[in-house]
Image: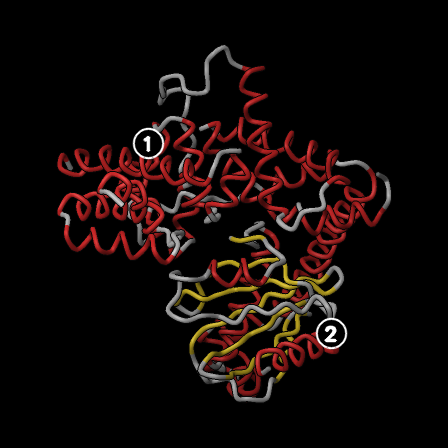
Amino acid sequence: MNRQQVLELLPGYLDQELSFSESRECERYLEGSEECRIVFAQQRAARAELKLAALRVDAPQALLLRIVAALPSEISETAQAEETTRKKRLVDRFRRRLGQFHKGGIGAPAWMSAGAVAMSVAVLGLSMGLYLAVPSHEQRLTQELVDDHVRSLQSDHLFDVISTNQHTVKPWFNGKLDFAPPVIDLAQQGYPLLGGRLDFVDGRAVAVTVYRYKLHMINLYVWQGSDGGARPHVIEQRGYHVAHWSAAGLTYWAITDADTDELDGFVSNLCAQSVS
Amino acid sequence: MADPTTEQRFKTLILPHLTSAFNVARWLTRNDQDAQDVTQEAYLRAFKFFPSFHGENPRAWLLAIVRNTFFTWYQQNTHQAPDAVFDEEVHSFETNDARQDDNPEAMLVRREDQQRVHRALQSLRTEFREVMVLRELEELSYKEIAAIVGIPIGTVMSRLGRGRQQLAALLVPMKQEA
């Protein structure tokens, strides 16, 4: 093989697309030829620049809706039904939450006023205890995750990568985080994988994989930690169910508006699959 | 055609590759709005041809349709050849600022650097730009790219090589100015 032929092979060498003998030939020239080294370095630098520049963007949600709407019959009906149900659920939930807020409002002025506390310590003692209790780290985190879950559904930032294929979603996280989140296909068990995204929770970048149970979205947050305990425990907050556990140095939070039974099913399937 | 299982298959096999389709269209058209039109048209075509799809690589199949749709669209909508001189006024799409704020990954990358690379890639000729995008953004294999573009694998490799070389040449002087 001559120098010119090797120069032509260098892109393939960089991309690991060559046969064994071709690769050996490239390596031989890279050791011996200054010109080959320079060309190879340029190729590698150009590739690195492209990777760094985050050139890939999400497809606009409006485009997805337009495409789905333009497709004939059943597909669009299913998707539109899902969209309508999703919006309706969000509106319902929002109303419910507003209701809770108004109820909660009755107690609020009591602890806001220091004067009132001084005058009727005995009466307010109980409510002080209730209202001023500083929420634990876990409570705050649960709150933050539920908020994030709702926001992911409202603002359409559900996915950075849309794929039902775990072998597409898992590599997508490569180089974006300092750990490798497990991405498991649970379609057989009734929880198809929809995609994943990066999110920012509790002051750190976390992996989120998105699954579905019927029309219920399940956001699975994963980061490094072991504060959850090996046995998943379920917390209910504002109508959402949140499961929290840790395994193999990673801590997991799964959040959904589906019932606890469905969430339990998801968690136990997930745990079973990650072990095997 | 109206058979629900076909439609269900389309939904599970083809719809999830929307991001790939949109990104390829975006780098071919070099314009966000045109990219949306091309992607939508490609999806309609894909749906029409879907009963004849029996392959194992739905993404590569869809991207070949996106590419063909682009060339047809280009002939119909402009009087220029696809490789007309790059005009930044005409060909520019928005680098998404909002995205940078809530995406921890993107926050790490300096915005100027991003735009510099954007402009360099946009200014490459279509034949180089498309293999670069298929390889570097979509991370397809040479074999898949060869099938999508309809060229031999050796040509994929030489276009990638020349494309990278041109990109490197475009980026180096800019870096020194900065």
Percent across and percent down for residue A72 are: 80, 36
Q: How many marks?
A: 2
Neighbour class for label 1 at 10 Å: few (<14), some, many (≥20)?
some
Q: Are marks 1 and 2 in contact (CB under 8 Å)?
A: no
Marking on residue B119: 1
Residue lying farthest to the front in this orientation:
A1
Which residue sits furthest top?
A: B79
Q: Amino acid at mark 1?
A: Arg
Q: How is the image coloured?
A: secondary structure
Please tell me which residue lies in front, A230 or A28. Answer: A28
Residue at left offset 62%, top offset 75%: A242
Q: Kindly identify the residue that appears in the image at 62 percent across and 40 percent down.
A: B62
Residue at which label 2 appears:
A262
Query: Which mark is drawn over residue B57?
Result: none
Q: Looking at the image, is mark 1 or mark 2 nearer the viewer?
A: 1
Q: CA distance from mark 1 to mark 2?
A: 49 Å
Circle 1 sits in a helix, a strand or a loop, which is it?
helix
Q: Amino acid at mark 2?
A: Glu
Measured as percent of width and height from the top left, residue A120 is found at 52, 83
